[in-house]
Image (cartoon, helix red, strand yellow):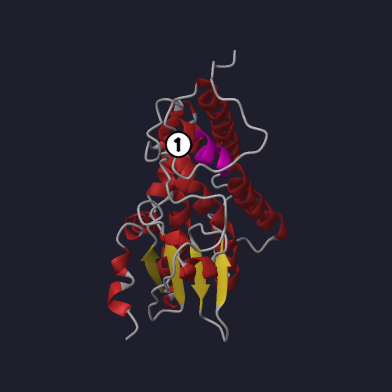
């Protein structure tokens, strides 16, 4: 049964900018809202991000590359305050990512700088550049890319849907929470069934697909995002939990989690002067 409500949608929606919201910097238009250049360091890769599941993905790939001895994968990491300061709406960031979402990458390793935005695109760009964490075999590569794009297309139901209504919405709406909890659990089951037959998402090889999925779904499994592990009965997904524990046992993954919260490790000592 629908929940009773006094709200009747108007014929034409208008933005009430004075209405209280957990995300006061959001607006129905694109473009910058204030002028500010982005900081830059000395390294070839400049990563602008935050300690969120999407932001941690790219840190994970960089840390895994460094763990293999690729010194040319050194990067400067700059925190973008996406909540209180709304730094994703600065002119410098919007120039790098017109969609004003983290993460965004400036790749200065070649003759001309290349901007890359959207976490999946950055993972694919770097995996191709370094020839690492993406299978060479066409069949396995297709599997890897399928799971990568599955993650980036599916996660709005978990983040903007379940997470928003379960945690951030000013009122708890049973219909909305039920709608997105159902879809989130279906996605967890998709992963659990895949990982029942495969060590990693793309097969027997650890890849950028695993890195993309770990922050979101591994975070859900361990109660690190939304505090919803019990609510979603995550213990029933045994194979997904095995994979999550396997991911968290990787030193590079743990370094990425720490680095995302302490970016001065990569930037403060390397400011251009």
Element type where label 1 sits in the image: helix
Residue at 66% in and 38% down: 12
The quadrant the N terminus occupies is top right
Depth check, front residue: 144 or 7: 7
In the displayed structure, 34 sits above or below 57; it is below
Residue 207 in view of the camera: no
Magenta stretch: helix, strand or loop mostly: helix
> Is residue 74 positioned above or below 98 on the image?
below
Left or right of 246, for residue 189: right
- Residue 185 location, quadrant: top right
Q: Is residue 52 above or below residue 132?
A: above
Q: Nearer the viewer, residue 155 or 222?
A: 155
Q: Residue 175, position in %: x, y?
A: 55, 22
Q: Is residue 22 left or right of residue 184?
A: left
Using residue 206 as the reference point, say whether residue 139 is left or right of it: right
Q: Nearer the viewer, residue 148 or 93?
A: 93
Give the quarter of the image for residue 195: top right
Q: Position of residue 94 (x, y in %)?
A: 52, 66
Q: Is residue 156 magenta?
A: yes
26 and 44: which one is in front? Answer: 26
**Label 1: few (<14), some or many (≥20) within 10 Å?**
some
Q: Read off the magenta span.
A: 155-163
Which residue is depicted at the point 42% across and 36% down?
Answer: 168
Q: Quick check: is 200 in the magenta stretch?
A: no
Q: Which residue is mark 1?
A: 241
The quadrant where residue 139 appears: bottom right
Look at 37% across and 34% down and name the residue there: 227
Q: Residue at x 38, y 51 (%)?
A: 83
User: Where's the C terminus, which quadrant?
Assistant: bottom left
Provide residue 115's location: percent of width, then percent of height: 56, 72
The answer to whether residue 54 shows anywhere in this view is yes
User: Percent from the top left, x then y, of residue 204?
Assistant: 57, 51
């Amino acid at each position: 049964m629908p929940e009773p409500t006094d709200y009747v949608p108007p014929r034409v929606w208008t933005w009430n900018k004075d209405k209280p919201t957990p995300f006061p910097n959001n607006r129905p238009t694109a473009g910058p809202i204030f002028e500010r250049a982005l900081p830059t360091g000395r390294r070839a890769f400049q990563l602008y991000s935050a300690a969120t599941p999407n932001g941690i993905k790219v840190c994970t790939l960089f840390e895994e590359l460094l763990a293999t001895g690729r010194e040319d994968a050194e990067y400067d990491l700059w925190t973008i305050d996406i909540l209180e300061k709304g730094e994703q709406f600065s002119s410098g960031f919007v120039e790098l990512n017109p969609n004003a979402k983290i993460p965004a990458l400036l790749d200065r390793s070649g003759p001309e700088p290349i901007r890359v935005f959207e976490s999946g695109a950055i993972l694919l760009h770097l995996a191709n550049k370094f020839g690492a964490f993406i299978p060479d075999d066409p069949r396995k590569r297709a599997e890897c890319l399928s799971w990568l794009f599955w993650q980036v297309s599916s996660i709005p139901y978990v983040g903007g849907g379940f997470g928003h209504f379960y945690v951030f919405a000013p009122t708890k709406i049973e219909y909305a929470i039920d709608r997105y909890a159902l879809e989130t659990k279906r996605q967890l089951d998709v992963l659990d069934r895949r990982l029942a037959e495969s060590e990693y998402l793309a097969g027997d090889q650890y890849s950028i697909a695993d890195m993309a999925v770990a922050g979101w779904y591994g975070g859900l499994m361990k109660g690190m995002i939304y505090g919803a592990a019990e609510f979603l009965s995550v213990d029933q997904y045994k194979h997904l939990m095995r994979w999550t524990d396997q991911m968290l046992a990787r030193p590079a993954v743990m370094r990425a989690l720490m680095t995302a919260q302490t970016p001065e490790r990569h930037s403060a000592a390397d400011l251009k002067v």
